[in-house]
Image (tube, helix red, strand yellow):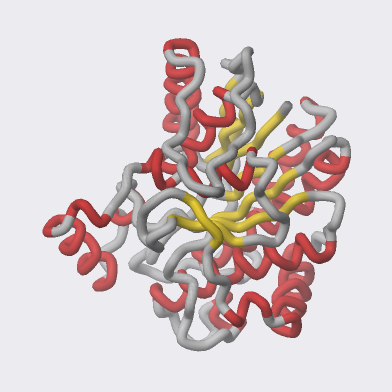
Amino acid sequence: MNAIVTGYGGIAYEVALSLAGRGYDVIIAGRDSAKGEAAAAKLRSAVAAAPYRKPPLSGSLSRCGSPSARPSTNIAFEHLDLFEPESIRAFAERAADKHGHIDIVMCIAGVMMPDELSLSSQGAERQFAVNYLGHFDLVGRLMPLLRNSKDPRVVTVSSVANRPFRFDLRDAGAGRGYRASISYALSKLCCLMYAAELSRREHWLKSCCVHPGFAGTQLFSRSGHFTMRLLRAIFFVLPFVRQTARAAAAPAVFAATSENAKSGAYYGPMFTVMGPPRRALMPLRAKNAKLREALWELSEKTTGIRH
């Protein structure tokens, strides 16, 4: 069994650890080779020392896939920059050369409210490019490998902050000016719309979307945006509103491994920002067929990839 996890820190690390504990050979992917190789080595050591760590799940959605009797320490790092289309193409080609099938693709890596605007070679704003469009491109290129799996799954990570003031795809390229919070919300809404649309179009695979609530990861510390400074202040005063990265990874682990996970469903913490996984409320925009079709057309036109 083979799994690809984009990202190697925080939630991505915990998801990779849980999948390896269940016997999956795991590829973690990211743009910093030194950090990625270090994370892979750390994961191998953690699996060898503690073959299985039961995730902190409870309630009706707690049934994740049974832990394997033979946890896998076959954990490798591969370079992948979701901001660069050429890097995505090269990663997918290497995956095809090395693997006959891929069972799970975990679309986790992301950026949050960078201080300055930057555009990809395709003209996409960084958050839209990394959080959403790069994963659209990646999954499209991995489709032949997913088709060779007996139980293919794609899990996409959204956010509680996935409700932009307006749904305007001009913001995908900062066409109305750059506002970091709006661009972030749009990118995460698009992740949810993509997961739902992928489930509708591809009945042979299971496509789920999740959000982690408020997680104690470094993602919140990398921006000087007012919203991020405010959140850091809140977390400092009220540290209990953040859950650990391991707890925040629980919805993603559930979606990737549980027989109870439903294609097209959206999962998150029970109490929105924290708690065990449960079905989450899907925004009306994510259910809008016309908006999803417009997003899909833009994504195919921009990337040149057809699922």
Q: Residue at x 50, y 64 (%)?
A: 127
Q: Is residue 210 visible?
A: yes
Where residue 92 appears, as percent x and y from the top left, is 74, 41
Is residue 4 shown left or right of residue 226? right
Q: Is residue 130 visible?
A: no
Q: Residue at x 52, y 88 (%)?
A: 166
The image quadrant that residue 152 belongs to is top right
Where residue 144 appears, as percent x and y from the top left, is 86, 43
* Nearer to the camera, 157 or 276: 276
Extreme left residue here?
237
The image quadrant that residue 222 belongs to is bottom left
Q: Residue at x 79, y 39 (%)?
A: 151
When the figure is inspected, residue 16 is found, relative to residue 292, above or below; the finding is above
When the figure is inspected, residue 46 is found, relative to residue 195, above or below; the finding is above
Extreme front residue here?
60
* Nearer to the camera, 154 or 60: 60
Number of numbered tags placed on the structure image = 0
Where residue 178 appears, as percent x and y from the top left, is 43, 79
Q: Residue at x 55, y 23 (%)?
A: 21
Where residue 182 appears, as percent x and y from the top left, is 44, 78
Quadrant assignment for the C terminus: bottom right
* Nearer to the camera, 113 or 64: 64
Quadrant assignment for the N terminus: top right
